[in-house]
Image (tube, rainbow, N blue to C red):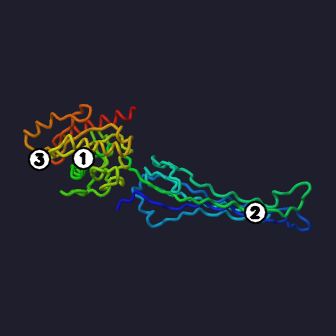
């Protein structure tokens, strides 16, 4: 199963208490104050890890606590600091304050680490309170408490190209044709129930990542179908390949519906670079093919016609995708 959302509770460590102690040396009946300071509580970090691909682990473990600092020791010895914890998440994970909805961090690079909670400071021992007028203080501080926070983890896949289309538009077939990804393929709606990533090997050892997103239906921006659960996965993509199958009798209307759903869900999506594609051209007649070649989408954009099964038009499609990806990199 693909888990792209989780809610957990995190807590930093409490600082250790300082102590009251005095020097005990032979022939020194009244030694000075020697109470050590408490150790600092452990911090809570999050770190992006390229080898993780889902938030499934957080389904079973909900609470994460750093270690408390140890109390101070005698002979001016400070207590040991508590161990910090590093919570590893997939690259592309957004961390939000569950109570306020505020984004705390966007871990969009492998190895990126952020401290979310500081551990409590250790309290001072009585040695810290010695003064000319108080040579034998019995005052000490307790360590500061750690902090708690309820956070939401939201995974957004990172890919160069995001595939957008209705169920059965041929997205899964395309990604299986141009990469080593093997998504489930069948002739019924919502075969794809979770996003799939595929690495496309382009000419001369060049590669780019393509994401197959579950099909969009009208009303997806309101959560219909699998809408809201997966639309966020294409927010990070550099470009979108908007696909409609050639068998449709309402090609222009289908493209319009898809573009409308993207616009209603997110202004960011609607402003992304888009390439329009018409799939399954191996299933229509030559006359029908000639007719759809005259189709123009949006601002007179010419769609690319292809068949993932027969490979017709695939080279042209990959060339277009690669060129647009490079263009986006240069911006």
Side (left or right) of 281 relative to 123: left
Mark 2 is surrounded, within 10 Å at the Cα level, by few (under 14), some (14 to 19) or many (20 or more) other residues, namely: many
Q: Label 3: how many residues lie within 10 Å, few (<14), some (14-19) or many (20+)?
A: few
Answer yes or no: do the residues labelled 3 and 1 have beta carbons within 8 Å?
A: no
- When asked about the image quadrant of residue 268, the answer is top left
Q: Nearer the viewer, mark 3 or mark 1?
A: 3
Query: Which residue, given by chain and number where applicable, does mark 1 sit on?
Result: 178
Q: Return the disc, 2 or 3, that comes first in the chain's sequence.
A: 2
Q: Residue at x 90, y 58 (%)?
A: 134
Residue 317, quarter of picture: top left
- N-terminal of the pair, mark 1 or mark 2, is 2
Q: Position of residue 27 (x, y in %)?
A: 92, 67
Along the line of sight, the residue nearer the viewer: 298 or 155: 298
Dot 1: few (<14), some (14–19), or many (≥20) neighbours within 10 Å? some
Q: Quadrant of the C terminus?
A: top left
3D distance between C-alphas at marks 2 and 3: 78 Å
State the mark number for residue 283: 3
Residue 149 locus on image (x, y percent): 56, 58
Q: 202 and 270: which one is in front?
A: 270
* Residue beneath disc 2: 18
Question: Looking at the picture, how far across and down is residue 281, in whole percent?
Answer: 14, 44
- Dot 3 lies on which element? helix
Q: Quadrant of the N terminus?
A: bottom left
164 relative position to 101: left or right = left
């Amino acid at each position: 199963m693909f888990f792209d959302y989780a809610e957990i509770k995190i807590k930093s460590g409490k600082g250790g208490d300082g102590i009251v102690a005095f020097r005990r040396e032979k022939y020194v009946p009244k030694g000075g104050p020697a109470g050590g300071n408490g150790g600092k509580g452990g911090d809570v970090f999050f770190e992006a890890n390229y080898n993780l691909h889902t938030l499934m682990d957080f389904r079973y473990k909900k609470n994460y606590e750093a270690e408390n600092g140890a109390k101070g020791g005698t002979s001016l010895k400070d207590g040991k600091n508590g161990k910090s914890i590093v919570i590893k998440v997939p690259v592309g994970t957004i961390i939000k304050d569950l109570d306020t909805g505020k984004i705390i961090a966007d871990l969009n690079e492998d190895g990126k680490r952020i401290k979310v909670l500081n551990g409590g400071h250790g309290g001072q021992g009585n040695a810290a309170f010695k003064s000319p007028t108080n040579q034998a203080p019995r005052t000490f501080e307790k360590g500061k408490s750690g902090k708690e926070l309820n956070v939401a983890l939201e995974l957004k896949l990172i890919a160069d190209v995001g595939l957008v289309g209705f169920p059965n538009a041929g997205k899964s077939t395309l990604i299986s044709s141009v990469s080593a990804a093997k998504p489930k393929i069948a002739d019924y709606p919502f075969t794809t129930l979770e996003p799939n990533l595929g690495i496309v090997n382009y000419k001369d050892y060049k590669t780019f990542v393509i994401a197959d997103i579950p099909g969009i239906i009208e009303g997806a921006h309101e959560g219909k179908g699998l809408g809201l659960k997966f639309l966020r996965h294409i927010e990070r993509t550099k470009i979108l390949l908007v696909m409609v199958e050639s068998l449709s009798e309402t090609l222009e209307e289908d493209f319009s519906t898809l573009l409308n759903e993207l616009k209603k869900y997110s202004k960011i999506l609607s402003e992304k670079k888009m390439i329009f594609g018409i799939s399954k051209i191996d299933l229509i007649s030559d006359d029908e093919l000639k007719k759809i070649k005259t189709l123009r989408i949006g601002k007179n954009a010419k769609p690319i016609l292809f068949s993932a099964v027969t490979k017709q038009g695939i080279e042209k499609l990959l060339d277009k995708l690669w060129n647009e990806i490079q263009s986006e990199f240069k911006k």
